[in-house]
Image: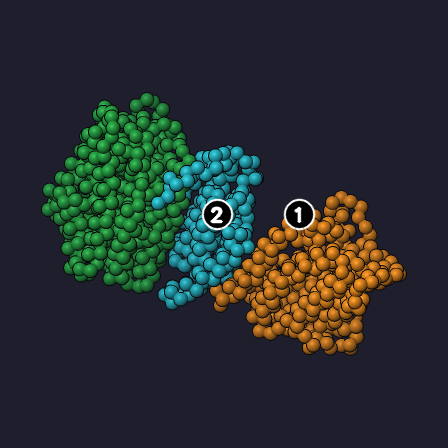
Amino acid sequence: MNHIFEILGFILIVLTLLMQWQSYVRRTIFLFAASSFVIALFLVLLGLHHPREEYMLFVLAGLTIAVRGLTIPAILNRATHRLPDKPWRVREDKPLMGLSGSILVSLVLIAIGYFIYQNSLYSVLKVHAGSVPFALFLQASLLIITHKHAYIQMIGFLVMENAVVMLSGWVFSGLPFIVEMGVIMDLLGLVVVSSLIIRVREQAISQEGETFGSELRG
Amino acid sequence: MSYLYSLIEILYVIVAAPLIVGVQHALEERMESKQGPSVFQPYYDIIKLFKKESLVPKISSPIFRLGPYVVFMFYAFLAMILPIITAYPLVFAPAADFIGGGLFFGAAAAIKKFSAIDSRSNYAHLGTSRASSLGVFTEPIMVLIFIMLGVISNTNNPFVINNVLRSSTGWYFSVVHGFVAAAFFLILIVETGQLPVESHTNGELGMIDQAMPFEYTGKDLALYKLSAYMKAFLLMSVFLNVYIVPFWVPMAHTGFLSVLLYMGIHLVKLLGLIIVFALINTTLSKFRLYKNFDFLTIAFAFAFLASIAYYIMK
Amino acid sequence: MNQDIIYILPVLFSLLGALICIPKITYFDKAGSLIGSILSLASVVYLLFQPNLIDHYVYVDGFSKLLLLTIAIVYISTVLYSVFYLKHIENLLFQYRLYYFLLNVFSAAMFFSVTVDNLGLIWVGIEATTVSSALLIATENSQATVESAWRYVIIVSTGLVISLISVTFIYGSAHTLSLHQLLLSHPHNRVFLIGILLGIIGFGTKAGIFPMHTWLPDVHGKAPAPVSAIFSGVLLPVALYAIARLIQIFPSETIRLFAMILGILTVGIAALLLTVQVNYKRMYAYSSMENMGMILIGLSLGKLGLLGAVIIILSHGMAKSSVFFLSGDVLSVYHSTDIEKVKGLMQRMPRIGASLFMGSMAVTGAPPFGIFVGEFLIFSALIAQHGWLIALIVILLLAIAFISVNFRAGRMIFSHQEKPIKEKTHTETWVSIINLILSFLVILFIPYLELLLKNLL
């Protein structure tokens, strides 16, 4: 069983690497939806693994598919239609560092996550391959830092959330159901609110350029 | 008997290599709803070229003449030491391990580049510099892949790796193996000149390997082409026999018939791989030249992930 | 369960206010918000005289009650102020209705965060404040406000993911998230320790504590005045409430030291950045950061320090909201947030000028106000526990902050302007003046505060 979890974890890592590779927003959204489905699969397997809590975990997996896998990508996709560019052209055009460089940094972060986990937490947790969620978390932060396009930053944040779900399910025995519910509801609200903010922001930037200049400094 | 098998192996590689390329070209044309050439077209080309006169640029040195012969010899030698139709070492196999095989591939590529430069043609120079700048990155990735396979099997011997992977489902379905195979697949695309990296046209902006033999004619060109087909064939065979489908390759003392039978199975495996390539070639478009390095970064990422995965799962 | 209802009344009343805002009828939004805020203030005052309640659903002790009180007061004053102030904002991103709706939901989320017994639900409540307040920042539609709202969303959410990880760690090692069970269990292992440390960093993001404070000045600089006021006055303390609970659960030496260092760094960064400010709203934002640093130091010290921290929370909540209200009035008259462009405030608007001066003195800890007493208590605890040297450093930093804020405020207020035009008085100034007086009155209730905090001191 652990072996399958490890494979799922690495699939998530590869999906995050591919998000780092892509510059088109719609493909990134698609990759995020795929990673949410992997998370849902993970929760189902976890439910089969812990028969005592399976009922809750299956409900949670269903919610994950409904919210993280379908609704949030749909909201983000719809929001790309409101931008001045054609939806399939919406992309990151001024990344902080080159593609190859950022992929290499992402790889290094996976290794760093492994070393940190192995040296600080492994002796206490005794969970095999527990460094995968930490690596995902670090990769997602890189995704946020290296991109200026707000949609991709948002997806970076959502990947981080997925990493936490993975962490709580794999390394520990999951959060209480009510807390998970609250987290999902918060996530949904955040995506709705921020898709509005992002839309206004990207419209303004693509029409006027960045004009706030020194107002947000110091 | 072992000598006989070696001879059969070389002949098999030389005879089957153009066929595979012909099938791939025919498939691609068919996928685009075109008539397409005969699957034997590469044979016709090579036979025609062998009948023609060879011309040599006046300012070139003997390296230009010798190049194709040496390269052909190298690939013929590689055919004897790699697991193509047998899963046990033949007479010459102890001559080189996996890293050694990699070095032979590298040496052949280097000689190809030297002879191309020696033609003093601008296009050949262009192709050589492009091929070298890609090669600088592909070869370390190759070495990383071989090292990861060495970690799996504790040896550098391709035959042992084949035996480990076909006998242990744990390794065969492991993440490490998956990542190594993915990385090798991407490198295979670069080395055999499939689409996202290189198209089979002589467009000046994108050509890499096509540009190198621009000054070759006649017999030299025929040998050159044949060895290019052999290289692709060998790499694909290694990919299939060692990494992806290590099954059904005949083990020691299973008799002559099983080797013959396996040749057929091997061609079917290659056909599967070629269908994948044809699909890629008909659906993807070519990367800009400088984007190829991003592609190599992804290949490196997979190879590196394999090593991280090995440590994480230990 | 029945008496639980009383303790969640503030949440219910503010949600009721939000519900009234939904139908599209004139004045329903304002009336609904007023009803919601008045009812929740009344219920909070009623709660003050009820016994503490700790069960599976709610955890209300003296500390929670005081925070509820602060939230309720700032909530009602924000609603009152918004009723008068919103007409000054041109180019609205959305209708008034949505503004009041979000304001009520935002307050409900804050009430919820300080009432529930479950650490995970505290997280949910604090994240809900992010969701409901993000649009409030962008009430005025300009590129800079939208950008600051976006920075707020992404930085704070990322920080809160860190605290979600911490919640996971705590649940993984203690197998419960209920505050009262955690307080009883005293788990002592490394996972738990790391969980608490991560939690301090994560919730610290929301409170403007050092490593991830960068959103704070942007948001306070660009948000409309009432939103800045409620952010600075109560949102930041609500995030600190979570940190206070974390410290209370596991009061080990490491965690206290860690929190104290973060607090001192926050005070230091804020004090140093205060010296170079040119924008008065950002200046008061850094002043909030400095106060949050002091509160964190107080929370990490415990005992007297905790009492001091609570006094600062109450007093700062009212004084800072009043200062931001006044800055909104100044902005609506001068149409600029540059300190250089605001001249002769005293001549143009004497009442606002005088109040702003008193407010600046109050938030930087001038003697008669509550913040001074709080800081004094924290210093006495700091000296007792860590010696003179650290206390001196912090006092020096506070002095830098005091001088830079009051020097600039003085320049705005007392500078001379040729041909001053006397503005007509703003009605909403009364809200700020009342808040300022309340902030002063806090010191009269210190013995009562001590009584309420008995279980923590």
Q: Position of residue C234 (x, y in %)?
A: 26, 41
Residue beneath the point at 64% across and 73% down: B157
- Please rate how many residues cluster around mark 1, counting C-alpha atoms within 10 Å: few if below 14, some from 14 to 19, many from 20: few
Q: Residue at x 18, y 61 (%)?
A: C387
Q: Which residue is mark 1?
A: B285
What residue occupies the far top of the structure in this picture? Answer: C26
| Kind of element beneath mark 1 | loop
Relative to B19, C252 lies left or right: left
Image colour for chain B is orange
Q: Position of residue A179 (x, y in %)?
A: 35, 48
Which shade of the palette goes to chain A?
cyan
Give left or right: position of A93 versus C352: right
Amino acid type indicated by mark 1: Ser
Horizontal and vertical percent position of residue B1 = 78, 77
| Residue identified by numbered label 2 | A147
Quarter of the image for the C terminus of chain A: give it.
top left
Q: Residue furthest front?
A: C418
Residue density around tag 2, few if under 14, some if 14–19, many if 20 or more, within 10 Å: many
* Subunit of label 2: A
Left or right: A184, with B303 as reference point: left
